[in-house]
Image (cartoon, grey):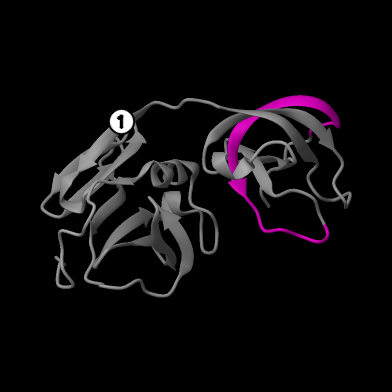
Amino acid sequence: KQEVVSIAVGPHTLSGALSPVELSLTRRGTHILRFNDKELVYVESSSVNLRTFEGMDVMIHGNVEKNTEANQLPVLVADNVSLIARPTRAWDIAPLHMKLDAPLEWNGTSFSDGMRFTDQSEHELVRLAQSSHTALPSGTPLIVGGKQAVRVDTASGQLIYIQNANSVIALTIDQSLSGGIGKQPAQSILRLLTSIVFTNTSTASGPDGNQ
């Protein structure tokens, strides 16, 4: 069972990574705040658009209240949300016509149709490359860089396919960052996804633009 931190009711300023959760009829909260992979509180707000902070490290000020059921995490009713800057490096991945920000500690290596990111021990964390697909496969729908995308769970991690005009980009996520089957990817991946910007106004690859 995931470790839970006990937080008393009352005014609080809490920091962590904000992620959306499924809406429920038996508990409050549209989002959840995690710190070092520990679940702190559910979060909701009628005055702040929490969706604009999804996948980001934030500081939230508000009032912690008991949830609908006693065994649920309390809910932080947010009055104010501010971003916490994390050191990143900007990358221009020309073969895929995209730019993104990756954690500063990641090492990036370009190849003919994409880029791979590794940790300090050269273990591959993320790979972006042109896919052999010309249309999105079945999966959990997403929007990445303003483009239609899907997430597919695999035994070794997760794959995110992004439709860019007539071509499809495959983003392979290592199991250590995937979050597990049916789970949200790690916050570093969510931040990377939200930073993606496509630089082409029309596709440079046709339906056969694969490896």
Residue 106 in view of the camera: yes
Residue 158 in view of the camera: no
Residue tagged 1: 89
On the image, the x and y values in percent for residue 92 come to 22, 39
Relative side of 134 to 47, left or right: left
Relative side of 22 to 97, left or right: right
Relative side of 96 to 30, left or right: left
Relative side of 8 to 160, left or right: right
Q: Closest to the observer: 89 or 149? A: 149
On the image, the x and y values in percent for residue 176 come to 43, 50
Q: Quick one: label 1, few (<14), some, or many (20+) residues within 10 Å?
A: some
Disc 1 marks a residue whose amino acid type is Arg
Q: Quadrant of residue 36?
A: top right
- At x 81%, y 61%, the residue is 25
On the image, the x and y values in percent for residue 163 come to 32, 63
- At x 18%, y 72%, the residue is 207
- At x 44%, y 27%, the residue is 86
Q: Quadrant of residue 191?
A: top left
- At x 72%, y 36%, the residue is 47
Q: Which residues are magenta?
A: 7-26
Q: In the rendered view of the protein, which quadrant contains the C terminus?
A: bottom left
The answer to if 196 sits in the magenta stretch is: no
Q: Closest to the observer: 82 or 4? A: 82
Q: Quadrant of residue 175?
A: bottom left
Q: Secondary structure at mark 1?
A: strand
In the image, residue 94 sits, relative to residue 205, either above or below, namely: above
